[in-house]
Amino acid sequence: MDAFALAVGCHSSPTTPFQSPPSPLPRNHRYPRRIPAVSKTLDKPHASTSAASSSSSPATIRPSNSSARRIAIAEVEASTDLDSTLSRVEGILQVQDYNNILCYFGELRRWTEVSQLFDWMQRHEKLNFSSYSSFIKYMGISHNPMKALQAYDSIPDKSLKVNVSICNSLLGCLVKNGRFESSIKLFNQMKDDGLSPDLVTYSTLLSGCRKLKNGYSKAMQLVQELENKGLHMDGVIYGTLLATCASNNLCEEAESYFQQMKDEGCPPNLFHYSSLLNAYSVDGNYVKAEKLVNDMKSSGLVPNKVILTTLLKVYTRGGLFEKSKELLAELEFLGYAEDEMPYCLLMDGLAKAGHIHEAKALFAEMKQKHVKSDGYAHSIMISALCRGGLLKEGRILAKEFEANCNKYDLVMLNTLLRAYCNTGDMDSVMQVLGKMDKLAISPDWNTFHILIKYFCKEKLYHLAYRTIEDMHGRGHQLNEDLCSSLILQLGQSGFPSEAFSVYNMLRYSKRTLCKSIHEKMLDLLVAAGLLKDAYVVMKDNMEWISTSSLDKFAVSFMRSGNINLINDVFKAFHRSRRQINPDIFRAAVSRYLGKPEKTQLLLQLLQWMSRHGYCVDSSSRNLLLKNSHLFGQKQLIAEILSKQHMMSRKLRSQEVKK
């Protein structure tokens, strides 16, 4: 059971309160090496169809003219029993008609009917490549990439030339659903199979780069590749590049591509202007934004809702709130402020600038005007109130939203979760988690982060640990500061093993860590007596750990650690050029002498020390001589110690000469 199941507690379902996200592609999944060829008879009436048309059965509709086809199409589109209706009209409709019905259901987002119709078309061989392309596209829109992959894998054989369009549809589905790595895998396989990616292929992949953390560098690789293939960037490619630059805060690069597009004789449209304007909104560069809008107007283009709303975002981020209010009034006059987005932009800007009362007034005005809202305005105001310390007001607004809301998304649920966590309302926190579970909404990084901070604040450290464990298992990047704090709290609260587990999750998820975390972890493990785990931390991170912490570890390890690893600890100290404290060696000698069966390891240690110039201190020397009989040959220890003493005098003499 994961952290969320533990937190909710009252759930009877064996699953966690958060259902798992759509299953990733199997690691061994392989797209067909050759895409099977569709039979040329697919576009022709099937033999069974002809037989059905000649039948005298009253249940069969005879093939007729285009009017009869239109009536049959309307009947299918209005049907409540799709399979039955499709069987009755099978003899009158053509593949093109089925494709049109598929698109009709798809545009209405009737995903059940889309799947049901496509399955029927497959069973009755009433489909062509347009059928596959449309179905894959709609599965992408409906966030069902697995069904799209199944359809792709079921395509019968066809010439490779046609298959590019099918691959493009599947690429679009994968990219739309955030599976960029899978789309690159398919892209590479396309090339391996002899297919030539076209501009649609590259445009689709470039659109996926917008959402990647380092998407711009990947986009540049794709652009270089398409140019090497002799393809020329068109308006769609330029638009995607501009949007990628904007999403990666690369304003100068966006300007460069915008000018390059104009120089190549490709006139920018509203989408291009909007993308560059969005790049200017990152740092609120209203001077360049206004110049761009004037340039757009002079080219004969009229600013639309998107352009004006993006300009409003530029003004708010630039702190020009009076201009923002004037532009909002203009949007209202033009009928472009019927939804909440323009109000949300200004409210968010006012709140983040510390003008919380103005933001509250604008929110009240928006509600008074009955502006259509999907909950984002509430989300912004709840977050702003909590951020401003007005926790009671934030909680009241959250309750108000829940009482009137019949539609939730992850952003809103995270906002409610944060509001209730900030006010310590555990019951409401559990209710929000229950809603996520019921709606099968998967948590994101923010969800986990909110919960971990809340559990730590409430001193529910074990729940915080289970939440981090679940977060890591889902592939989310761990926050180092939060994990470091939790490691200490777990260790001090009697959960040292869990603290070490968090340390390992953090260590394996990041290439570099703050140096101090290794010493903190070592001290916790030594104090808890978990010396085997402490040995791992010491061995891998000695250069970041202080001498005092290392000495405490070493003495503890000599006394009660794995006796077979004692010599390895000495060698690790030597490799890192750390001084071996006499107390450490004395503790090791005492431990070995207490285990006569391990005296061979002590001999090996003494011989190793002699070779590397280490000399036994007088107290340990006397202890060894006193117990020399344990080594079988009484003179053996004396000879080794004598050699060490001579070596030590020689080394001291050399140091004096230097």
Image (tube, rainbow, N blue to C red):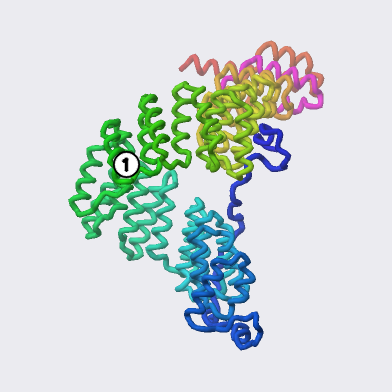
Q: Is 345 located above or below residue 55 in the figure?
A: above
Q: Based on the picture, tell me whether residue 216 belongs to the magenta stretch.
A: no
Residue occupying the point 44% across, 23% down: 388
Provide residue 199's location: percent of width, then percent of height.
37, 63
Q: State the residue in front, 595 or 293.
A: 293
Which stretch did the figure color magenta?
577-604
The kind of secondary structure the magenta stretch mainly shows is: helix
Report whether 384 appears left or right of 330.
right
Which of the image's four quarters has the N terminus? Answer: top right
Residue 253 in view of the camera: no
Q: State the residue in front, 623 or 249.
A: 249
Reading the image, the residue beneath label 1 is 332
Q: Based on the picture, tell me whether residue 585 belongs to the magenta stretch.
A: yes
Tally of marks: 1
Q: Is 94 located above or below residue 21 in the figure?
A: below
Q: Residues within 10 Å of mark 1 (few under 14, many from 20)?
A: some
Provide residue 542's location: percent of width, then percent of height.
56, 26
The residue type indicated by label 1 comes to Glu
Residue occupying the point 60% across, 30% down: 429
Residue 645 in view of the camera: yes
Instruction: Quadrant for residue 468, please give it.
Output: top right
Q: State the residue in front, 4 or 124.
A: 124
